[in-house]
């Protein structure tokens, strides 16, 4: 390849035959000539082992392009019980055309060169049945090859159609650029480097391993990012609604439909003699009667959905050019049923497998057939159900039809257990509004932990917990040790927290029993009719603490304090280990952990070496009393006109300004739950997920009420089971496909 590039470079300079080369080109030629003796060191084994009856051979091809050229290389992979070997078969390279061409187009040219090279190699070695795997490191090229050629512009469409016609059964996959041996050929390698170049002689190392260890990236790209797309004019067309017989829509299983039809056909058959012997044998149906009933409904469905195709075949004409059955080469058998012609006439298969019956994808008979095969395969997947179907019938776009049917299967839905995932909601007002630290607080429990009564051996250890308080606006953390899991113990910890951090206006938490009890007692304490309530109201001029509960069984609604619990456990696990501390030691350690958590930066440090400070929760915990009254901002005032106290207040306002400018903007993006799925409706059937029981024992429930958020998206619903009525998030319910079934039935009736 280097010699070809040098020849092209000399030709581009338009030099005469006797004109000396420029010094740079002459030096490159001398280097090339000095390297040629190294080619004598190359030894290639001529034995491939492709004719060994015990070996399984595969062809692997790699394509790559650079700005100066493109190349393709083919390997033979042979697998036996002794191991796997790789052999370099052949390679070919070409220089890039003189006219400037984009790199994706050059990668496509390399793919076309690879397809021709593999086709030629497979023909010479008589390996027509060997699997073919073709690799490229260009995702754009792979997307072009996997799509229809008519979607792309002329240059790309011609090469894509050539690749698809040459090797229609080849599997195109994506390979990382560092593992692509064709990269060596497209750029050129010196002979001294070529002698010991393992990637070139034996291919990527993962090809000698099992297929599961091969690169799994399929190279998918969004259609919006693809170049060379052909502009397509779209026209709105009226869709013809085909109404099927009511008798066909009445049945929910193929077995009942065929048996009822067979009995009706027997009773309508003329010339049947009613004798005692015939009465005894009439209690059962013969297999040919079931078969006649199926063929009768097949003819009805084909007449309704493929009327133009049946008319053309009956008159011996070609099918309409836009017919979806053109590629199947259909024909009519002796009973008037349209079957697939195809290319399997001489295959050693049964007649139904060689020429399956064509079934329209939109018929209710198709839905019954798919459901029957899905049940016969013991609720198998798409591939197993489709394989069982194609032993008898052929459904255009059958994979999509089977997927839709399996998606509506209640048994598969129960075991698949896919919960609806709405779009991530907006942050609460307390998260994005400047406020005094811990004015809006989230609380959760961590633990359990073991706390000893005193030091020394033989002293009993009791179970305790850690109460984690998190400020919603500053992410500041406050930790308190709690002796038990009761409302009284939490109220004591809450009083200690309020005494040190100030009174809260809102507290957010999960629906733990201790938090519910604490909310009830706090409401009693802050009630205006009580003496304590009047005294507190007189001092704080507050209506009390408003407690806001997340929906039951929804820990992801409190991700802020769940993250604080995780961080607290991280420090405790590394410091304590298996040791058991006293209450005093635990309280001291929690204060140190609290200091560590409140010193973490809210935003990454800047790149400026002179900026040694970072915005941390600790900046908001100093410089003001716990019950400070909010004051107007002083950031716009000059320092010369401010008193010492006002200068301190201005420093505090500077922190809030940095909080608004640096930290608050970072919360605008959605970290997850980006797709808004179709929400549930009142009356939908669902399953209530439980972590303690298998899916077969999850209770059946019906949605009775929706609780949409301020953005109109429902994330919490009220459901009614056989014994109770509960409020649960969408993550805890599994929607059953009954609503989709009713919708499709109503469309069919119309």
Image (cartoon, rainbow, N blue to C red):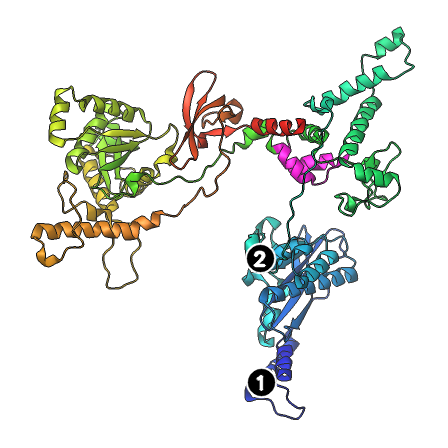
Q: Is residue 398 magenta?
A: yes
- How much space separates mark 2 and mark 1, taking CA atoms? 38 Å
Q: Who is closer to the viewer here, 350 or 456? A: 350
Label 1, secondary structure: give it.
Answer: helix
Q: Who is closer to the viewer here, 575 or 281? A: 281
| Rendering quarter of residue 471 | top left
| Rendering quarter of residue 266 | top right
Span of residues in magenta = 380-406
The C terminus - image quarter: top right
**Residue at the (26%, 39%) spot, across then down:** 470
Looking at the picture, does residue 385 appear above or below residue 217? above
Label 2, secondary structure: give it.
Answer: loop
| Relative to 500, 95 lies left or right | right
Is residue 460 something that shows in the picture? Answer: no
- Where does residue 659 sit, x and y in percent of width and height? 26, 50
Magenta highlight: main SS:
helix
- Where does residue 576 sit, x and y in percent of width and height? 27, 40
Residue 25, numbered circle = 1
Q: Which residue is mark 2?
A: 226
| Rendering quarter of residue 185 | bottom right
Give the crowd class for mark 1: few <14, some 14-19, many >=20 residues within 10 Å: some
Q: Is residue 302 magenta?
A: no
- Where does residue 262 sit, x and y in percent of width and height? 80, 20
Is residue 76 something that shows in the picture? Answer: yes
Q: Farthest residue in the left direction? A: 643
């Amino acid at each position: 390849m280097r010699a070809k590039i040098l020849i092209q470079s000399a030709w581009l300079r338009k030099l005469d035959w006797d004109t000396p080369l420029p010094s740079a080109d002459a030096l490159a030629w001398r280097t090339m000539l000095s390297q040629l003796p190294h080619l004598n060191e190359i030894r290639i084994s001529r034995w491939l082992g492709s004719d060994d009856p015990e070996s399984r051979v595969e062809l692997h091809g790699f394509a790559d392009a650079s700005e100066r050229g493109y190349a393709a290389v083919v390997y033979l992979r042979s697998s036996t019980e002794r191991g796997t070997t790789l052999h370099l078969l052949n390679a070919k390279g070409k220089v890039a055309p003189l006219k400037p061409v984009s790199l994706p187009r050059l990668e496509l040219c390399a793919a076309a060169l690879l397809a021709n090279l593999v086709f030629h190699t497979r023909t010479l070695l008589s390996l027509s049945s060997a699997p073919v795997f073709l690799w490229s490191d260009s995702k754009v090229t792979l997307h072009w090859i996997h799509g229809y050629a008519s979607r792309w512009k002329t240059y790309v469409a011609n090469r894509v159609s050539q690749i698809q016609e040459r090797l229609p059964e080849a599997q195109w996959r994506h390979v990382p650029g560092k593992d692509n041996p064709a990269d060596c050929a497209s750029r050129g390698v010196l002979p001294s480097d070529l002698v010991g170049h393992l990637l070139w002689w034996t291919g990527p190392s993962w090809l000698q391993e099992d297929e599961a260890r091969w690169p799994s990236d399929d190279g998918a790209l969004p259609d919006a990012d693809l170049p060379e797309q052909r502009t397509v004019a779209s026209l709105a067309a009226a869709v013809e609604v085909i109404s099927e017989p009511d008798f066909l829509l009445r049945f929910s299983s193929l077995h009942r439909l065929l048996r009822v039809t067979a009995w009706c056909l027997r009773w309508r058959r003329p010339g049947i003699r009613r004798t005692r012997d015939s009465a005894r044998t009439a209690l059962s149906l013969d297999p040919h009667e079931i078969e006649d009933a199926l063929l009768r409904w097949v003819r009805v469905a084909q007449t309704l959905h493929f009327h133009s195709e049946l008319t053309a075949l009956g008159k011996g004409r070609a099918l309409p050019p836009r017919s979806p059955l053109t590629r199947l080469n259909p024909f009519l058998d002796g009973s008037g049923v349209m079957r697939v012609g195809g290319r399997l006439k001489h295959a050693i298969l049964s007649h139904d497998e060689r020429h399956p019956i064509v079934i329209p994808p939109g018929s209710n008979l198709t839905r019954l057939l798919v459901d029957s095969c899905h049940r016969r395969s013991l609720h198998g997947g798409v591939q197993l159900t489709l394989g069982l179907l194609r032993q008898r019938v052929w459904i255009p776009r059958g994979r999509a039809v089977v997927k839709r049917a399996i998606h509506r299967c209640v048994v598969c839905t129960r075991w698949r257990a896919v919960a609806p995932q709405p779009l991530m909601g907006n942050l609460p007002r307390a998260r994005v509004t400047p406020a005094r630290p811990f004015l809006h607080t989230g609380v959760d429990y961590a633990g359990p932990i073991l706390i000893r009564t005193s030091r020394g051996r033989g002293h009993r250890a009791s179970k305790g917990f850690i109460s984690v308080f998190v400020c919603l606006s500053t992410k500041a953390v406050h930790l308190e040790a709690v002796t038990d899991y009761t409302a009284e113990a939490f109220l004591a910890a809450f009083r200690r927290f309020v005494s040190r951090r100030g009174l809260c206006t809102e507290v957010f938490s999960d629906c733990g029993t201790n938090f519910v009890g604490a909310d009830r007692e706090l409401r009693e304490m802050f009630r205006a009719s009580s003496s304590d309530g009047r005294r507190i109201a007189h001092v704080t001029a507050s209506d009390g603490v408003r407690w806001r509960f997340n929906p039951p069984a929804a820990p992801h609604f409190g991700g802020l304090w769940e993250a604080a619990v995780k961080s607290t456990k991280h420090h405790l696990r590394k410091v304590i280990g298996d040791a058991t501390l006293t209450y005093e030691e635990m309280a001291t350690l929690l204060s140190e952990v609290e200091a560590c958590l409140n010193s973490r930066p809210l935003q990454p440090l800047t790149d400026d070496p002179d900026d040694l400070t970072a915005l941390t929760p600790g900046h908001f915990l100093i410089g003001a009393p716990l019950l400070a009254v909010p004051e107007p901002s002083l950031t716009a005032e000059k320092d010369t006109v401010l008193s010492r106290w006002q200068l301190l207040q201005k420093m505090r306002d500077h922190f809030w300004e940095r909080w608004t400018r640096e930290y608050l903007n970072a919360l605008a993006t959605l970290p997850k739950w980006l797709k808004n799925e179709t929400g549930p409706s009142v009356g939908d059937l669902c399953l209530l997920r439980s972590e303690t029981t298998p899916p077969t024992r999850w209770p059946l429930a019906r949605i009775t009420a929706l609780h949409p958020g301020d953005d109109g998206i429902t994330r919490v619903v009220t459901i009614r089971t056989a014994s109770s009525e509960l409020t649960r998030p969408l993550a805890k319910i599994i929607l059953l496909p009954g609503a989709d079934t009713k919708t499709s039935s109503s469309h069919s009736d119309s």
